[in-house]
Amino acid sequence: MTPTKLTVASLRKVSLLEGLDDVALGIILKQLTVRRYEKRDIILQKGATDGELLFLLAGQLHVVDYTLQGKEVFLHVIQPGDYFGELSVIDGAPRSASIVAIKESVVAFLSKRHALNLFYNYPSVIERLLIRFAQVIRQASGRQMLLSIPSAHARVYVMLARMVRSPDLHAETSTVTLENVPTQQEIAGMVNTTRETVSRAMQTLVKEGIIKRDKRKIVVLQPEVLEERAMHGEGSLVKETEE
Amino acid sequence: MTPTKLTVASLRKVSLLEGLDDVALGIILKQLTVRRYEKRDIILQKGATDGELLFLLAGQLHVVDYTLQGKEVFLHVIQPGDYFGELSVIDGAPRSASIVAIKESVVAFLSKRHALNLFYNYPSVIERLLIRFAQVIRQASGRQMLLSIPSAHARVYVMLARMVRSPDLHAETSTVTLENVPTQQEIAGMVNTTRETVSRAMQTLVKEGIIKRDKRKIVVLQPEVLEERAMHGEGSLVKETEE
């Protein structure tokens, strides 16, 4: 990776700052500190109390949490242009999760004081922040429903069925093509299972002619059948592992 | 329930409006519509697109979602003084869950336009809103960890252990008293199991002398042993139901 000179142009790629003019971006530029990370470096440690706002300028990060026994649990992916760490800026509480680089990454840091100024001085920023929070909360409720399904295969089916149901897809034909599908490892994290189980669940669907795979694309050949499988899964909520 | 005359004084009990003076409260008062509900009435229907902001003035509500097969899934409780429905005000998307009265309740409604004015015109309101969102998101990550534990008994232990770990409790003695513990039905909803399973898990702890129960209070006699049980539960994350 060649060294990045941080410019107003590079800030325009940050989703939170999209509504700002060059004057505002110029002010923020001077307040930022840029750091580079290698793969597997830890950017934020759960429990830390620094309170800075962070922007991912290049690379890719994973938000992870740990069980009491130290097992890593994947929460979600951070992509270039995303901001993160805003919870501690707002409530002053320690970091709720850790963030690790999964490839070489460039991160910009904004101090808590400057971040609060950014939130409260620019209406377009606060609006974006609120909309993002609303989305995160909606996703979290959806995920709670998902994780309440005892069968891991059924969770994979439900996740795929939800992608098909997405309002972004205007399915006029009987097949639906899902682009930029998360990797099996990422899906495994989202539905709380192993990559191997995701792979087996997908293989089942391929064998039965319900889906067809092509790199990061999935062609859903029989959306109704997938939906049926998912319904079967969501219906199995009462099955319960007991000690 | 005697009819409530809505006054500035009754608005002071609404958490979102705490920082506002009587002039501001007087303006909001005139914008509100008050409705009463009987037990089991539906206040909001999942998928509705009304976009109003709601305040619970009296009673108690449950936020619930439904599986595709119509099974009700409890999400959380709304208490008097709480506001709700803010997600649709912000992102304009349909209601993500339904809300039902679990006793006679009084709800005040603020139109989307007035709610947005409230958010953007009063810094104390936006600050409270952001802090609340931050809390909801933190709780959701915690719940995601919780629901990833396959054993229902272990989930109950982990939830109790988390209450013991709460920073509000300054445990100087070896026993910890938890006040206003959620009902078994509410705990069942939070950890996604049945009330009967919660009851059995609690009974196990009582029999072993780890906790003692007294109405809505729980005295944790052996917090370290409870913590051990919880750790055992969180460690069992790799057990997985497969088809």
Image (cartoon, coloured by chain):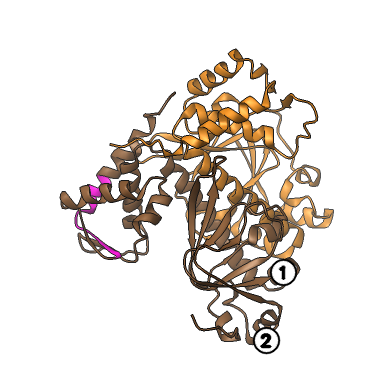
Chain colours: A brown, B orange
Which residue is at the far top?
A: B207
Residue segment shown in magenta: A216-228
Badge 2 marks a residue whose secondary structure is helix
Q: Position of residue B3 (x, y in %)?
A: 70, 33
Label 1 belongs to which residue? A111
Badge 1 marks a residue whose secondary structure is loop
Depth-wise, is mark 2 or mark 1 nearer the camera?
A: 1
| Residue A125, visible in the rendered structure | yes
Q: What is the C-alpha distance between the residues marked 2 and 1?
A: 19 Å
Please, what is the three-letter code of the amino acid marked with disc 1? Ser
Please, what is the three-letter code of the amino acid marked with disc 2? Val
Instruction: Report the residue at 83% width, 57% height from top.
Output: B23
Q: Is residue B41 left or right of residue A224?
A: right
Instruction: Report the residue at 79% width, 46% height from top.
Output: B12
Q: Position of residue B98 (x, y in %)?
A: 49, 42
Tell which subunit mark 1 falls on.
A
Can you say whether B175 is above or below A93 in the image? above
Depth check: give the residue in front, A213 or A129: A213
Quarter that holds the C terminus of chain B: top left
Label 2 belongs to which residue? A23
In the picture, residue A217 is in which quadrant?
bottom left
Q: Is residue A134 left or right of residue A165?
A: right
Query: Mark 2 or mark 1, which has the lower sequence index?
Result: 2
Can you say whether B80 is above or below A95 in the image? above
Q: Position of residue B76 (x, y in %)?
A: 56, 38
Quarter that holds the N terminus of chain B: top right
Residue density around tag 1, few if under 14, some if 14–19, many if 20 or more, within 10 Å: some
Residue B94 is a magenta residue: no
Q: Position of residue B78 (x, y in %)?
A: 62, 39
